[in-house]
Amino acid sequence: MSEEVKKFHEEEAIEKTYDLRISLRLLRYLKPYWKTAAVALVLTFLTNILISLQPWFTKHAVDDFITPKQTDGIWFFALAFFGLFLFRFLFSYLQEILLNTVGQKVMFDLRTEIFTKLQHQEVSYYDKYPVGRIITRLTSDVDALNELFTSGVIDVLGDLVIIFAIIGMMFWMDWKLALISLITVPLLFSATNWFRKRARVGFDKVRTRNAKLNAFLQEYISGAQTVQLFNAEKKAQERFHDINDDYRNANIETIYYYAIFYPLVDFISAIGIALVIWFGGYQILTGISANGTALTIGTVVAFIQYSQQLFQPIRDLSDKFNVLQAAIVASHRIFVLLDLPILIKTPEKPKKSGKVVGNIEFQNVWFAYKENEWVLKDVSFSIKAGESIALVGHTGSGKTTVTNLLMRFYDVQKGKILLDGVDVRDWNLESLRENFAVVLQDVFLFSGSIDNNIRLGNKDISNEKILWAAREVHADEFIQKLPETYEAHVKERGGGLSVGQKQLISFARALAFEPSILVLDEATSSIDTETEQLIQQAVERVMQQRTSLVVAHRLSTVQKCDRILVFHHGELREAGTHNELLTQRGLYWRLYQLQYAEDRSQNSMLNFPNQDISLKSETAG
């Protein structure tokens, strides 16, 4: 696989593990909810302080009640201990609720911002990046940030509080035993630093492989029919196996580091506790202590508990650091998307908006999807309002590009495209596109009702207008036969409907919006002859008093257009009516001859079996 293809399908690796600017930018998303986050932070501090008091209670229970066999006041002491844990439970519960509430609100805002950005991003962006990779932004990357906000930053602060609280309590109780307890801490930090570096690389690999897996799945699930048609299931499975294997290995590598780190932390913790038992036991037996008093059993028990508690937040800090690293990497990718400039947008001071008359003019237009690979070369033509214009030519000649440029899905590199005498780049973009309706060969239907697929969320389109549009294109005939008629559920991408039915719905959608300019891009090529005749009648009525552009390979569908523009290798080579172009005996004439020669050949092949049967019958006779 070439480097270019790898870059296209895979996530880019983030070399810098920590970026202060990204961290500060992430904190801005907390700003609307800072009061809730502050309360959660206070509760975290209180919870961790209460945790640090637990061994101190144990010390007094052993020294003041259990060892001297003192029963007076033990119930009050037990009640206080219970109260400590009750408040710890309540504070922890409220903190968890508040943190997750803040996290979910931040994720909602972030997903909304990403989706809004994607909705306004120019079409060329989707030409460059696989959909699966984009979906990863809204799912895996956002989830990584969710973990940061719910169990990352505030928990890190809480862990730091409990570490310092525990160390302070230990030195207050016995400074010598405290120093002994902390001997193994450098070992723990070394192990933690090793794990942090290795796991960070592993997390980056997992996220990269996950994005590649998502991109592959989206592409091959969408194209499942094509895969089956060409018996390519085995090849697809082999490719999926390789990608899935890379993803599995990346996860196993990360698990390997966890499998070493956690047992290692427990082992180091056991060494620390063993030192406390040894040194504390020695002091108890000799009766020596740092302050000149005998060390008690309760103090040793408390130190054992403090040692266990101390190692837990240090280990957690490593996990939280990995959460922070994963969030930094994810946020970097999200911010790269959010910071992409929207190249095609409404100018600050648009010169035109509202309803168009329908006059179109291309002035010396040059356009290329890739630099210097010109799809259109110095194309110039004009269309008067109400005219019907056909665009014909071989595949790749630039026909569909003309309509895409007119609706400003892309901007031209040279020349101008004028709509009612105003450059389309000077129009209000939303207003510009409101004047168009497009019917494509590959119809896209959304999951929902037929009614919603025609209306597309536009509340200004009444039910009466939907019924009118459906009747005009004869879609009403099959819709009325459905159990729920216009409320019938449409599956994803129109599953359950025939190609012709989906096409009829798309025609109804176009008519319901009452466009000033109608674009038909191979719109009838997927419909049977009978349905095409019905649609053709409706289209001819709708095209009246509207500027219409008809892109077609089948020349039979464009003969009634006012003019025909013939494109060849990105150049406008011929223009005129059907009869005028046939008289010129040029490109259009050759296309016409080739197409009808193919039609005659197909007809003769269809008739050949019958002829063969007839001959056999005569021979038999």
Image (cartoon, grey):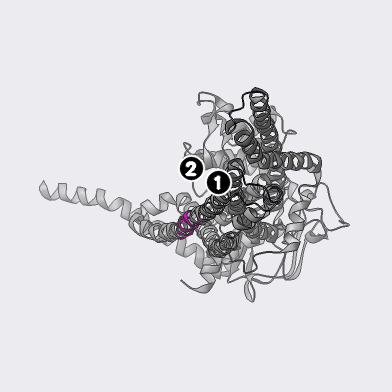
Which residue is at the front of the view, 256 or 402? 256
- The secondary element bearing badge 1 is classed as loop
Q: Is residue 155 above or below residue 197?
A: above
Mark 1–mark 2 distance (CA, rounded to whole Å): 8 Å
What residue does disc 2 label?
A: 499
At a point 75% along the width and 46% down the height, the residue shown is 434
N-terminal-most mark, 1 or 2: 1
Per the rendered image, the range of residues in magenta is: 253-264
Estimate the x, y position of residue 597 in percent, counting from the top left.
Answer: 42, 62
Quick one: which residue is furthest to the front in this view? 286
- Describe the element under mark 2 as helix, strand or loop: helix
Look at the image and say whether residue 266 sits in the magenta stretch.
no
Residue 343 appears in the rendering: no
Relative to 421, say whether 107 is above or below: above
Closer-to-camera residue (443/328): 328
Looking at the image, residue 448 lies above or below residue 374: above
Residue at image coords 20%, 48%: 613
Mark carried by residue 173:
none
**Residue at 71 percent of width and 41 percent of height:** 49
Q: Which numbered tag is attached to residue 443?
A: 1
Instruction: Name which residue type carries label 1.
Output: Val
Q: Residues within 10 Å of mark 1 (few under 14, many from 20)?
A: some
Q: Nearer the viewer, residue 573 or 236?
A: 236
Across and down, in percent, residue 336 comes to 69, 61
Q: Position of residue 325 (x, y in %)?
A: 63, 59
Q: Main secondary structure of the magenta part?
A: helix
Residue 599 visible in the picture: yes
Q: Are marks 1 and 2 in contact (CB under 8 Å)?
A: yes
Q: Amino acid at mark 2?
A: Val
Q: Quadrant of residue 14?
A: bottom right
Mark 2, residues whose alpha carbon is within 10 Å: few (<14), some, or many (≥20)?
some
Frontmost residue, 217 versus 391: 217
